Amino acid sequence: MNIKKNDPVEATLELIGGKWKPLIVWHLTDKTMRFNELKKSLPSVTQKMLTQQLREMEYHGLIHRKVYAQVPPKVEYSLTELGKSLVPLLDIMCQWGTNYLKSAKDITLKL
């Protein structure tokens, strides 16, 4: 899981590439969430995939995992400062996606 890339774009994509990691960051932007809350907010992700993605993101310092010593176990996830630094990038991606969807809709209407 070590990132050994000389290309900054490649390194970024290695850390947050794929379908789920950007969405996990997006959902944790301003809040702390438990595993089941994240799972409900990402209904098509499998439990195994969500667990894997969270572990990788924790390993790379993007999210913080807090375990409470209680029964039943309680685990909360939040963004670290490094993870929070991704939010402006996701804001730009969101704006780009909004513009794309609008232009794609306009193109479809013209056809």
Image: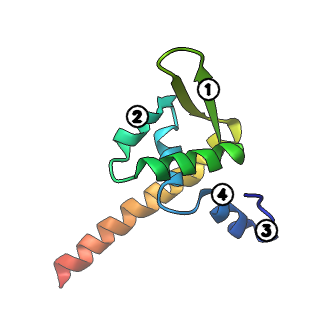
Query: At which x and y percent is residue 73?
Result: 51, 22
Structural distance between the alpha carbons of marks 1 and 4? 21 Å
Badge 2 vs badge 4, beta-carbon distance below 8 Å: no
The three-letter code of the residue at mark 2 reads Asn
Structural distance between the alpha carbons of marks 2 and 4? 23 Å
- Location of mark 1 (residue): 66
The three-letter code of the residue at mark 4 reads Leu
Q: Is residue 18 above or below residue 40?
A: below
- Location of mark 3 (residue): 5
Q: Is residue 104 above or below residue 72?
A: below
Structural distance between the alpha carbons of marks 3 and 2? 33 Å
- Location of mark 4 (residue): 15
Query: At which x and y percent is residue 19?
Result: 47, 60
Name which residue lies at 52% across and 63% down. 18
Left/right placement of residue 91 relative to residue 38 reads right
Name which residue lies at 75% across and 66% down. 8
Badge 4 vs badge 3, beta-carbon distance below 8 Å: no
Q: Using the image as rendered, state which of residue 15 and residue 85 is in the foreground.
A: 15
Badge 1 vs badge 4, beta-carbon distance below 8 Å: no
Quarter of the picture holding the N terminus = bottom right
Mark 3 or 2: in front is: 2
Q: Is residue 50 above or below residue 63?
A: below
Badge 3 vs badge 2, beta-carbon distance below 8 Å: no
Q: How is the image coloured?
A: rainbow
Quarter of the picture holding the C terminus = bottom left
The mark found on residue 36 in the picture is 2
Structural distance between the alpha carbons of marks 1 and 2? 14 Å
Q: Mark 2: which secondary structure?
A: helix
